[in-house]
Amino acid sequence: MLRALIALMLTLSFISTAHAQDAATPDRSATGGAQTLDDILARQRGEDVDNSFRSQATGDPDSAAGMADQLGTLGGASDPELWRALRFGTADVTASNNGPAATVLVQDGGMKWLQFRQGPLATYGAYLLIGTLVLLAVFYLIRGRIKIDGEKTGRTLLRFKMIERFGHWLLAGSFLLLGLTGLISLFGRKVLIPAFGHEAFAFLAVGSKWVHNNVSWAFMLGLVMIFIMWVIHNLPDRTDINWLLKGGGIFSKGHPPAKKFNAGQKLIFWSVIVLGTSISVSGLALLFPFEINMFAATFAKLNAFGISGALGLGELRETLAPHEEMQYAQLWHAIVSFVLMAIIFAHIYIGTVGMEGAADAMTSGEVEEQWAREHHSIWADEVTAHDETQRANATPAQ
């Protein structure tokens, strides 16, 4: 899944690859080495253009004319050469603000980031979420609700303690708020402004941003809590293989034996931990602009291990402007969030309308004993044996 996410973001985003270097060098003698009409048209078509002929043409201070000669005060660089140096980040710029991005005066990746954000990101993200809901609806119509097969005993087993339920709902509630406010930010211009107008959306956007920034801390706390409480129960074991081979009994009657968490729940758990951590790290990079730079170092490792070449992406750029780091962080944050939202949709379905008795585990914390024996028989036997031992030890000797 991680490999597919990397391929999706890097293939569709604005990264520059080395494909253009394989092409024959265009003849620019007629323009004195400057860009040609073919260069301009190729760039407008979205093709990769080797900019080295321009990025390196930024003047030569050693060949500067004397102060009394024409252009002498420019230090050997003409105005176009100066602007090229600014664009490609090679100009010697000083600024009163010493922030990381203060000396970057021209950064031309913003339009490509905006086009990807408003185009493929929003489009395919919407398709993913809507498609997931449609598939779940179709599955419900075909399979129906998974009911308790045997006769209910009227007895219950404690499945989750109060602190476990608190951690779960802290994570779940914050994620729902973050997902909603994130979607408002992403689809505001295309959907909400035409529907409600600029003023109404401005009020909604400001509130959504405040909620998103502050609720994020609750999400990260919930993520740490459930990892600490449940990681020991979500380590793979042999029972998971049998559970997966039988499809968890979802498509047939009878459920394979399982411990406190079955293989399907373990997949959900590790998806939440891995993807949630990735969302949190990229979110921190957005909360603290220009302080956390992940992508230049990541691209360097992908190049070093040959992963970028295996994915057909060529040599990835290892030097990024501070703004580009932020743009990549925002795209990655949104893409991984879309994937996790789709997974959580399936989790919510199973925990509510999809399965009888499942919601009790996270509301009261107590589950019907028959439900426990059907879905988590190994765990149910362990809990029952433990309870009987405690009762026996509490009974006075005769």
Image (spheres, rainbow, N blue to C red):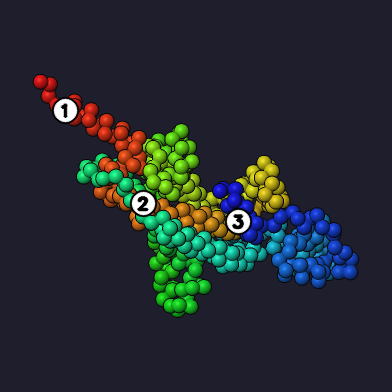
Residue linked to disc 3: 9
Q: Nearer the viewer, mark 2 or mark 3?
A: 2
Q: Are marks 3 and 1 in contact (CB under 8 Å)?
A: no
Density class for disc 2 (Cα within 10 Å; few <14, some 14-19, many ≥20) is some
Sequence-first tag of 2 and 3: 3
> From this viewpoint, which residue is outermost toward the right?
29
Question: Which numbered tag is attached to residue 113?
Answer: none
Q: What secondary structure is found at the residue carrying circle 1?
A: helix
Density class for disc 1 (Cα within 10 Å; few <14, some 14-19, many ≥20) is few
Residue linked to disc 1: 394
State the residue at coordinates (45%, 77%): 195
Type of residue at label 2? Answer: Ile
Question: Which numbered tag is attached to residue 146?
Answer: 2
- On the question of residue 261 being in view, the answer is yes
> From this viewpoint, which residue is outermost toward the top?
398
Give how far apart the Cα atoms at labels 3 and 1 are: 60 Å
Give how far apart the Cα atoms at labels 2 and 3 are: 37 Å
Density class for disc 3 (Cα within 10 Å; few <14, some 14-19, many ≥20) is some
